Image (cartoon, helix red, strand yellow):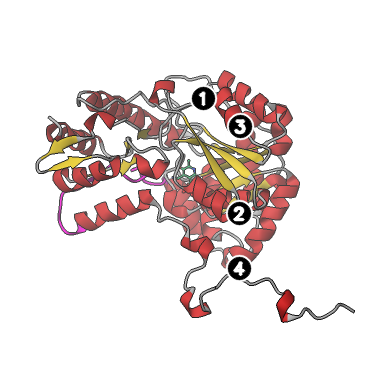
Amino acid sequence: MTEAATPAATPSAPERPAPRDRRVSARIGAIAESATLKVDARAKALKAEGRPVIGFGAGEPDFATPDYVVEAAAAACHDPRNHRYTPAGGLPELRQAIAEKTLRDSGYAVQAAQVVVTNGGKQAIYEAFATMLDPGDEVIVPAPYWTTYPEAIQLAGGTAVPVVADETQDYKVTVDQLEAARTESTKVLLFVSPSNPTGAVYTADEIRAIGRWVEDHGLWVLTDEIYEHLVYDGVDTGSMPVLCPGLADYTVVVNGVAKTYAMTGWRVGWMIAPADLAKAATNLQSHATSNVSNVAQRAALAAVSGDLAAVAEMKGAFDRRRQTIVSMLGEIEGVVCPMPEGAFYAYPSVRGLLGRRYGDRVITSSADLAEYILEQAEVAVVPGEAFGTPGYLRLSYALGDDDLVEGITRLQKLFA
Ligand code: PMP
């Protein structure tokens, strides 16, 4: 029998507000609103008021989902099998098709049992970190980073450790920088190529060097390959666990149909993980959300089983817009915009525009600059603060050619 503790022996607990005064948990209260979605919502609200806003904020293709995908979904609605719960980790035929697509597209040979179908790549990222991290674990996150990564890491109890690579190094981190950030607590490297927000693409040699470093130090890697098909200029790149096969048992690949098939709203993504992690993540998903909508999964099945014609067409348009946006931004004094080699984002440094007087005010941050641009030119862009690097703007060029030219022309006039 244990002795009952006397009141005197109880350490004095810090004063805790009453339950009703603790409205939102500290964990969720610490999450910031997604800055990219906020800019997009603001631009759409202004548009709804009738203002001619041009949006460079949203990270989504302006193309329609291919017809054969939409038709597969329509047919799925009429099939009663899709009206019921299905396995939490995804339809078996979709997991198999994703394994086959992965071998076809990146050369990575995986089993269907390693695939977990999620509600978009976003859920895969959150679940992967929740499955890998214990409190105190650190994740090295190259910056500029996509705004969701640090939040997902923190939500999972980990700590994001940013490593900044600016435009002078084409927004790509080096092994030396990673090594300088590594501690006893480092567990995972977050890796994304092509990158959101910079469009940077690592070469096969650079990926091999980073993969070797991950391997040498017994770390894990989460590699986000959602923009795998949007690589320009014939860059020689590849998938980290293919270039470094020894890493396969310590790699989580994140991917999805959103960017490749213009399917952002369908919400289908996936992770590919070692089988034990895939099983653990499926357990988490079985309590959080269960299966992704069967209709959306059937649409994704049609998409990944089909060819890559849709993405080839989009890529041609994005490539053309990429050249236009970079050359037009380059004409603005104070803006430095390296040529992105992948995805559909330009990430110019606007530090040369800061500290100047505009009308009756001096603008000192990229966040203020983005506000000013929206007010004065009715152009929506996302400030670098959202990506861990103040002094920059992100512009998505996945919008129509005419809008793109009109939007950047407005910026040229504003800063002339
Ligand atoms: N990874 C990256 C790098 C992204 O840019 C996005 C979308 N913005 C995603 C993952 C997630 O995409 P989704 O959840 O729409 O599949």
Q: Which contiguous range is marked in magenta?
A: 48-66
Viewer-proximal residue, 314 or 169? 169
Residue, disc 3 = 104
Instruction: Quarter of the image for the N terminus: give it.
Output: bottom right
Viewer-proximal residue, 180 or 341? 180
Other residues around mark 3 within 10 Å, as few (<14) / some (14–19) / many (≥20) = few
User: How far apart in space, not on screen, are marks 3 and 2 (Cα)?
Assistant: 35 Å
Q: Which mark is nearer the camera, 4 or 1?
A: 1
Most common SS among magenta residues? loop
Circle nearer the N terminus (3, 2):
3
- Measuring 81% from the left and 81% from the top, which residue is drawn there? 4
Other residues around mark 1 within 10 Å, as few (<14) / some (14–19) / many (≥20) = many
- Measuring 48% from the left and 32% from the top, which residue is drawn there? 229
Instruction: Quarter of the image for the C terminus: give it.
Output: top left
Name the outermost residue toward the right: 1
Circle nearer the N terminus (2, 4):
4
Circle 2: element type? loop
User: How far apart in space, not on screen, are marks 2 and 4 (Cα)?
Assistant: 34 Å
Circle nearer the N terminus (2, 1):
2
Question: Which amino acid type corresponds to the residue marked 4 in the rendered image?
Answer: Arg
Question: Which amino acid type corresponds to the residue marked 2 in the rendered image?
Answer: Gly
Residue, disc 2 = 157
- Measuring 48% from the left and 26% from the top, which residue is drawn there? 172
Image quarter of residue 14: bottom right
Question: Which amino acid type corresponds to the residue marked 3 in the rendered image?
Answer: Arg
| Mark sitting on residue 46 | none
Residue, disc 4 = 84
Circle 4: element type? loop
User: How far apart in space, not on screen, are marks 4 and 1 (Cα)?
Assistant: 43 Å
Q: Position of residue 305 (x, y in %)?
A: 57, 41
Residue, disc 1 = 202
